[in-house]
Image: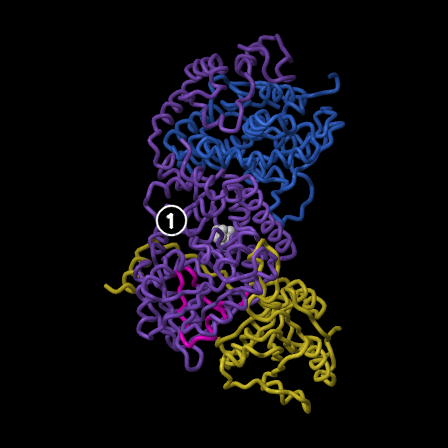
Chain colours: A yellow, B blue, C purple
Amino acid sequence: MSDRARILDSIRRAPAARLAHPGSYESPAVSPSWAAFAAGLRAAGGESHGPIARAVLSETIASVCRSRGDGPVRIDPALVSELGPGEWVPLDLEAAPEALADIHVLVSRGCVGVAENGAVAVPIVEPALARALFLCQHLVLVLEVERLEADLHGGFARFWSTEPAGRTVWISGPSKTADIEQTLVLGAHGPRTLAVIGVGDRDA
Amino acid sequence: MDVALFIPCYVDQLAPSVGIATVEVLERVGCRVRYDPGQTCCGQPFVTAGEWSQARRLARRYLDRFAGADAVVCPSASCVATVRRRYAELSLGDTRVVKEVGARTYELSEFLVRVLNRPDVGARFPYRVALLQSCHGLRELHLGHPSEAVEIEDSAPGPTEAVLRAVRDLELVLPDPPDECCGFGGLFSVQFPEISTRIGRSRLVALAATGASHVTSTDASCLFHLEGLGRRAAFGPRPIHLAEILAWSEER
Amino acid sequence: MSLPLDRAARVALPTTESVQHHETAVADLRRRRDDALARVPDLQALREHAAAIKGHTLGDLGTYLERFEEQARAAGAVVHWADDAPAHNRIVHDLLAERGVHRVAKSKSMLTEECGLNPYLEARGIEVVDTDLGERIVQLEGEAPSHIVIPAIHRRRQEIGALFHRTVGSPEGEHDPVVLTEIARQDLRRRFLSAEAGITGVNFAIAETGSLVVCTNEGNADLGMHLPSIHIACMGIEKLLPRLEDLPAFLRLLARSATGQAITAYTTVVTGPRPGGELHIVLVDNGRSRLLADPEQRGALACIRCGACLNTCPVYRRTGGHAYNQTVPGPIGAVLAPAFRSDREASTLPFASTLCGSCSAVCPVGIDLHGQLLAWRARAPFGGGRIRWVARLGAEVLARPRLYRLVGGLARLAWPLLSRRWPGNPANAWLEGRELPPHPGASFRSRFRLWSQGSRSREGSRSRGGSGE
Ligand code: SF4
């Protein structure tokens, strides 16, 4: 008998305890606010900017990047076209991991944000983007304010109604650890800082 | 009201004054107290030791003795929790009797507040007193709000706190953390003496830090443990059972 | 009479200072958990929902495993099944050996700890680097994690500074956590870039989509799965959830219960390998299906390893995790021990609890931990000890009121003797660090007799002791 057959067999021989699935979770109706998201993000060690008008997005990105100090800035290619003219260097999707490790600031797009915990969903279909998200020193995510949900249930429903299950990371604040005497240190392996820039005009 | 007294074996033998105080308090609030000397032990030590066949014998005895009572009052939350919560797991046969006797067996402060609605028994105790919540009282009998239960919004004090707050001139304080176990645990205290005393000492430090002159609890067993530690270390507030505080009245 | 954990506690946390340090660190986690959960308006409903999903999934686990396998395959993953730890280790090793892999970056996984994967691979010439900072610390120290969420919680910064000085060449005397973390970052980054395969644990797996869910704060699991071309994910069969939609309830509870964060910094959902890469999923039983067949104990399979029950446990706080001598310590560890081990020590762990019930009260998925500990005790009274006759004798006495009175009277006479330590004194275990209470005086029942005869001596309630029998 294969291990597979043995395991399934032994599970099936266990006395049945069929319990109904509780169905979908009804979370309390709260409307998402950027202020709540910003608070959630702050608690997670990140910083929020905005919400800003689309017209000043390029400017804002440039200023956030500048505030991170000197070093190579790379932009998610999917975002470059939106930003219009500027000195944007798109992320090289063919770059070797070693090269990605030199990125100082990476700017990418968040797909859905969650107010209760400051998390932002980032699809990671492109391997280079997936790596860069964790190898860069500083991360900047652009999020449409309209794509904010109050809690994670809403966030999941919103995100996966349009995206395939695929590969996705929900990011809440910078990389962190408290493994040495509970002292919180930002930048354990991944980005040392995370900034989320809200674009659009829902409640400021 | 007629009340059957259940004085658990360890109170009977090791803390008789707690039993007497319980009678005094109950009589003061107008109860007629009966005491059946045929009672001994609820079986708790055997439940915790895993000796369930022995526990069953004692549980059946308890049910026999108290099946007819309207209310059984006991100055020990852990024994009440055994009767009310653990008997159901022992497969004792008639589940109706188990349920009924369990529902009618009360810890003293619970009885005063939830049955008689008399948190004030006319006691006076002019000291600062730290409350050591009994874990079984807290989490099995809901005599207070355990600190884990952050979802509970009800801020009214539970019965144990309520009766203490009604005592004149008593200043009630809680240690920090407010309701960690004292480390007694019955059999645990002798199977794991090092751990038990480590826990107890740290509770003692927390209790002493409140500046209280006394520490009180619904359970004399927890107090024995703290008293034993305190006497060895010559340190810490003086243990006094809840019933003894409630029995302390103006004329003293 | 003292049981193994009691002796082990003296070794694991030998000094008052080490106990205090551990106690404070762990209690702090519990406080953070309280603060975080107090801010969740729908907490009770959320916990019940999560528990119901776990209960449902475990009740139909076979179906969900097959569905998961089918979907994961459809997404391009390779699914392996391992009956036990050796099978698991063999599968992982074969995968690595066939591809000529010598360097592996591994992120936190209690399952691979349970299976002893590191020593197995190292003995076969494969270098495994634990990349979670806490795991890295215990790996360099040559010890096991002492906590399931914070592996090096028992270590102080000075010890970690000295360890890094010895092993990764940090400056002598440096023990600032920020500096030490930066040193580890630089060292591990190099190792990530040169790793040929990544091994990760799995927090949840989704049957409907064949997805894996991995939660970390450091991002180390992500580097391990996105950098090398081979990703091996090792998971216990109990990690399944039916649908992606079921996941948020658990994510909302997990980090809050663990560290008081609203969610971990990274929650990665992976379905199939990345383009050009390989994804292998190893489904491990190793005793879980046996536990599933045990109606009293199967509830423990709902555990999401948040560590809240450890953090609140008065016992764990003062023993440290190593004293438990097994992968998962604390209340959940004591519940799992007899299910996975058949040695006598394991049967004593369910006794290592005061039954205060705080563990059950904090468990986000509603496992009745102290109830399960009691149920284990009923199967092996006294931890399988040979003192059952004491219990019998005790029950015989307590079942006979007159005999009980007699024994009580004798104990009263012997009180001064019992209060002192001497070889063979039955009270010796109590007398470790404690005194007996003062002589109690006459028993309640004899005082009550006097009372009801009309001589209502109020003596008794004023002070304990004094009067004698
Ligand atoms: S048993 Fe419950 S509290 Fe303990 S680690 Fe598991 S999920 Fe967390």
Along the viewing direction, whichever of C268 and C250 lies nearer the viewer: C268
C230 magenta-colored: yes
Would residue B229 be visible to someone looking at this image? yes
Asked whether, in this view, residue B55 is left or right of residue B131, the answer is left
Would residue C366 be visible to someone looking at this image? no
Instruction: Name above or below for residue C313 compared with residue C54.
Output: above
Query: At x 54% / y 86%, what residue is drawn?
Result: A92
The crowding category of the residue bearing disc 1, from other C-alpha atoms within 10 Å (few below 14, some 14 to 19, many at least 20), is few
Along the viewing direction, whichever of C54 and B191 lies nearer the viewer: B191
Q: As drawn, which residue projects farthest toward the front? A: C172
> Residue B138, located in which quarter of the rendered image?
top right
Query: At x 50% / y 56%, what residue is drawn?
Result: C163
Q: Position of residue B114 (x, y in %)?
A: 63, 34
Instruction: Name above or below for residue A87 compared with residue C287.
Output: below
Mark 1 sits on what residue?
A: C295
Q: Position of residue C268 (x, y in %)?
A: 51, 70
Q: Amino acid at mark 1?
A: Pro
Asked whether, in this view, residue A38 is left or right of residue C406, the answer is right
A11 magenta-colored: no
Along the viewing direction, whichever of A136 and C303 lies nearer the viewer: A136
> Residue C176, located in which quarter of the rendered image?
bottom right
Along the viewing direction, whichever of C66 and C423 lies nearer the viewer: C423
Instruction: Name above or below for residue A154 compared with residue B215.
Output: below
Q: As drawn, which residue projects farthest toward the bottom? A: A85
Region of the chain picked out in magenta, as a range: C218-244
The local secondary structure at tag 1 comes to loop
Q: Position of residue C258 (x, y in %)?
A: 55, 55
Q: Position of residue C424 (x, y in %)?
A: 40, 21
